[in-house]
Image (cartoon, rainbow, N blue to C red):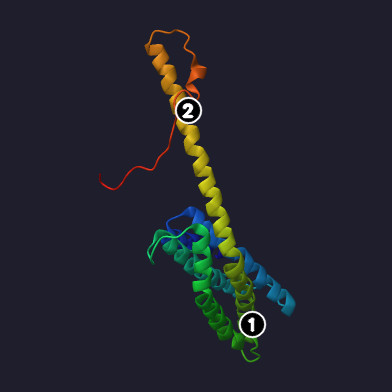
Amino acid sequence: MVPAALVLIFALVYAALGSVREAAIVYTGIPFAVTGGVLALWLRGMPFSITAAIGFIALSGIAMLNGLVLIDHINSLRDGREGEPVEVEEAVRRGARDRLRPVLSTALVASIGFVPMAIATGAGAEVQRPLATVVIGGIVTSTILTLLLLPGLYAWVERRSAARSSIRFPIICSRLLFLENALQGWRNGNNHPDLEAGFGATDCRLERPDLGGN
């Protein structure tokens, strides 16, 4: 049941962001949330049970919600949906600052709502306590990740992606130029064309196309 719920949560996050990379970044909140839930069970001396498993499912949803709110806001700042487009670093700083209060509010409301269940002693308390303990412990660690680690992870992944893109296109262009020069040599009747001349023979400049309509 838990693996199926995690797969469904990932599918929903991917549908919201439209990017496997960004969905994976948001998904990193689950390991931290699960760590907090397991630690809370261990501190209270509670075994893993069906109700604890249900708590982990609810916890995963809360952790994904906080991460999704933050990443979507950062993307909106980069795309210019909330004003002028900004660079990755500035979008991360502003996004983390703007979403600090909503993330903390979500965490506090969920945690406070489960406190009566966590300290219950009446009928059915043995079922309620593991679920509430998992949710409260996991929310603490997942909130720390969302506010402190997730913005830095997003900036690091985006920088690496931009660096790979800047390297990949010149390599492809140089190979195409090499092939073009080689084919030109064969067309000119040279049975042994100087293929090495293809490297650097033509200056390959990758420029952004003019989309101004001129």
Identify the residue under disc 1. 129
Residue 144 placement: quadrant: bottom right
Relative vertical location of residue 120 with respect to residue 198 in this rendering, above or below: below
- Give the class, few, some or many, for how many residues have Cα within 10 Å of label 2's Cα (few <14, many ≥20): some
- Comparing 150 with 195, the one in front is 195
Q: Position of residue 116 (x, y in %)?
A: 60, 88
Q: Residue furthest left?
A: 214
Could you say whether the residue bearing mark 2 is in a helix, strand or loop? helix
Residue beneath the point at 37% across and 64% down: 81
Q: Position of residue 67 (x, y in %)?
A: 52, 67
Answer with left or right where residue 94 lies relative to residue 51: left
Question: Could you tell me if residue 124 is visible in this image?
Answer: no
Residue beneath the point at 41% across and 17% down: 183
Residue type at tag 2: Arg
Question: Could you tell me if residue 149 is visible in this image?
Answer: yes
Relative vertical location of residue 57 with respect to residue 131 in this rendering, above or below: above
- Comparing 139 with 104, the one in front is 104
Q: Which of marks 1 and 2 is nearer the N terminus?
A: 1
Identify the residue under disc 2. 175
Answer with left or right where residue 202 lies relative to residue 136: left
- Give the class, few, some or many, for how many residues have Cα within 10 Å of label 1's Cα (few <14, many ≥20): many
Q: Where is residue 196 in the image (x, y as percent from the top left)?
A: 52, 18
Q: Position of residue 162 (x, y in %)?
A: 51, 48
Could you say whether the residue bearing mark 1 is in a helix, strand or loop? helix
Residue type at tag 1: Arg
